[in-house]
Image: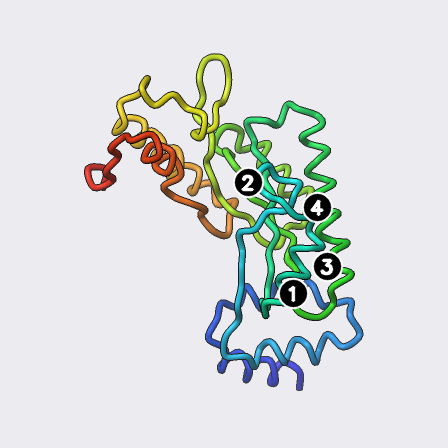
Amino acid sequence: GFVTIVTYFLSLAKYNFKIIDFRWKICYDIDNYFIMQVFYLAKAELTIDTHTHSDLSPDGNDPAERLATCAAANGLDVLCITDHFEVPEKEDAAYRDLLQTRYHEILQTRQRHTADPCILAGLELGGAIYDPAFAEDLLRRYDFDFVLNSLHHIFYPDGPVDYYNVDYQRHDPQALLRDYFEKLYNQCRLGLYDSLAHIDYPTRYMRLKGIDCPLEPLY
């Protein structure tokens, strides 16, 4: 029966079952979901992008609809839109409301694209270590398919500052990186994520400012 067919195709698949589960969640309300599911199970490879941002993120330029259209034109099988939510900015009511806007825009885009690419509702959740209870509650309130773990901010007495804006002359580079990786490690231990994003985030800006930041001493 159905279970036997799915088990057979799973034995042929070369990719993570979680991706298959994503497709199942997305296609359960589509009339031909069974055909689509078996088709994806039978594919030897999937082209997937799990870290993208729409224009509702500060580092995105295009609306979710255009991301989906471009992904389809370039043969992408799965597109995960992971707009930002930074826990250190949670007190900003307008920022919290923007998360809801982002989420519903992705869902609406998914409804308009029932064929390729498979659209996943994702999130890049930054700085959960600064308020784990809030982060857990947020993820309970939204049914995200895929969550990225990131750490963009360092905390000063007067508030959080993105590593992009840090005055690195104020810091010992190795001490700053050690603090960053310790926080990131503890954030990973919260278990709220599917994947870790840009593990060396501060170093990209340190190098741009000519600061030597070898990682080997931290191993």
Mark 2: which secondary structure?
strand
Label 3 and label 2: CA atoms lie apart by 21 Å
Contact check, label 3 and label 4, Cβ < 8 Å: no
Q: Could you say where residue 218 lies in the image, as x and y percent from the top left?
A: 23, 37
Q: CA distance from mark 1 to mark 2?
A: 21 Å
Residue identified by numbered label 3: 110
Mark 4 and mark 1 lie on one chain; the one further toward the N terminus is 4
Q: Secondary structure at mark 3?
A: helix
Q: Amino acid at mark 2?
A: Leu
Tell me which numbered mark, 3 or 4, is placed earlier along the sequence: 4
* Quarter of the image with the C terminus in it: top left
Residue at the spot of label 2: 125
Residue type of the residue flagged with mark 1 = Cys
Q: Amino acid at mark 4?
A: Tyr
Q: What whole-number distance in Å separates the C-alpha atoms at marks 2 and 4?
A: 13 Å
The residue positioned 49% from the left and 28% from the top of the image is: 130
Instruction: Name the foreground residue: 87 vs 47.
Output: 47
Which residue position is annotated with label 1? 118
Q: Earlier in the sequence, mark 3 or mark 2?
A: 3
| Distance of label 4 from label 1 (alpha carbons) | 16 Å
Most extreme residue toward the top is 158
